[in-house]
Image: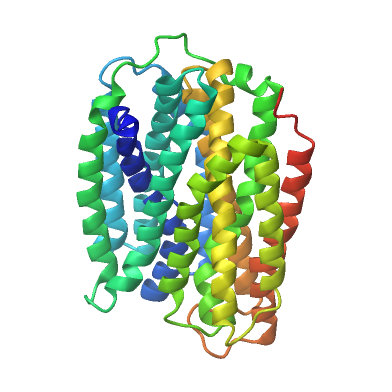
Amino acid sequence: MSALRDRLPAYSLFAAIISAAGLPIYIYAPKYYADTYGVSLTALGTLLFVLRLFDVVQDPLLGWISERLRHGKALWVSLGAVLLAASMFGLFGIAPPISPFWWFAITITGLFSAFSFLTINFYAQGISKVGDDDSGHIRLAAWRETGALLGVCIAAVAPTLLMDATDDPFAVFALGFVAVTALATLYMWPEWKGRTETEPSHIKEILSDTLARRLLILALVNATPLAVSSTLFLFFVESRLGASGWEGPLLVLFFLAAALSAPLWSAISKRIGAKRTLLTAMVLAVASFGYTLTLGVGDEIQFAVICVLSGATIGADLTLLPAMFARRMSKVSPNGGQGFGLWSLVSKFTLAFAAAILLPLLENAGFRAGATDLPDEALTMLTVLYALVPCLLKLVAIALLAATKLED
């Protein structure tokens, strides 16, 4: 009853629609435009990287704006939700009225600009709601990130499930997204009132705080493996495992494991501490990525087990790290807007790295989306990028976390 009283389910639902517009779009959009409209993977990767350079200016600016929206915040957030829904429908629900490359550029820019604005305000609102209650940040994070992971799970599998029911599954998915976004926005409306009346913070203050700076660096390194594996997931299943048609069920296993594990990691962290909990999850992730290097055609079952294990480790990453950062921001930057502007930038930059570096490398190695006669060099490159690169990055993240004194 306490959760209902605190309206925590509203945070779960709103987190679901924001997250559904994030990671799943990086999973599906490049492949969809490459397969459907023949847009080059290199061109798409370059475009996504350029957009992330734009975020270097945009996200801190949106954080600055967020901290100064004293009145009418619910209206501005609702307008952001409208832009998010309209961009999603334009991306998947409308045949490009202009060059597919430029239509992709326009709609993806609107989508991720709205994504940034909503994410910054949403996480900053969580700081205002909880305040200095350390355990409250973990509790809110458990509800918020479980909703977010369920949103990712549903968005990741919906287009695949809809393929048997309709000739245009992505358009139907986009329509459904618009409807759920409207519902989530209405349900969350009362929460935008009563923000903490504190002075706006400055990026310099946040970056000068040692722990905040270390958490941002840790988030950058630790999130990159997920960005890499998400960008290449469909290609790996289709071309390396030869398991076309398994994409949907495997995505469900991955993200459902992440969603179901989030409350468990939260409970464990209360017993042994957030740092030790995260280190445990990271070691499990390294083992999962390492075993994936040995997989090939016909290893769908083994990969399904890996999806469950690696998905569970993501539940720890996405629940505990934002809660740690929010707890620190409650002391360094109580408004939260500038801090989560930086957090949003870091999160999206990892996806940009994956798109800008990995897709051109794959294409240069002879990889072609949907091709059945790929050279061995292309398949080897796909395996190395999908499994070995995340493994090495995760080892770096473990070293960084081990050297960070969270108790400070």
Q: Is residue 123 left or right of residue 205?
A: left
Q: Nearer the viewer, residue 130 or 163?
A: 130
Q: Kindly indicate the quadrant of the structure image that contains residue 386.
A: bottom right
Give the side of residue 185 with respect to residue 297, left or right.
left
Above or below, comparing residue 52 to residue 406 in the picture: below
169 shown above or below 23: below
Residue at the far bottom in the pictured view? 373
Task: Estimate the x, y position of residue 201 in percent, counting from the top left.
Answer: 52, 15
The reply to whether residue 95 is in sight is no
Viewer-closest of 307 and 62: 307
Q: Is residue 406 left or right of residue 186?
A: right
Where residue 252 appears, as percent x and y from the top left, is 43, 66
Q: In front here: 72 or 195?
A: 195
Residue 258 visible (yes or no)? yes
- Compared with residue 367, is residue 107 higher up or lower down, i.e. above or below? above
Q: Residue at left 49%, top 71%? A: 234
Give the total of numbered labels.
Answer: 0
Colour logic: rainbow
> Which quarter of the image is occupied by the N terminus?
top left
Q: Which residue is found at the position 71% from the left and 22% from the top?
A: 408
Residue 12 location (% of width, % of height): 35, 41
Counting from the top left corner in percent of width and height, residue 185 is at: 24, 37
User: Where is residue 129, by image quadrant?
Assistant: top left
Residue drawn at x 55%, y 80% is 301
The residue closer to the viewer here, 79 or 236, is 236
Q: Where is residue 155, by image quadrant?
A: bottom left
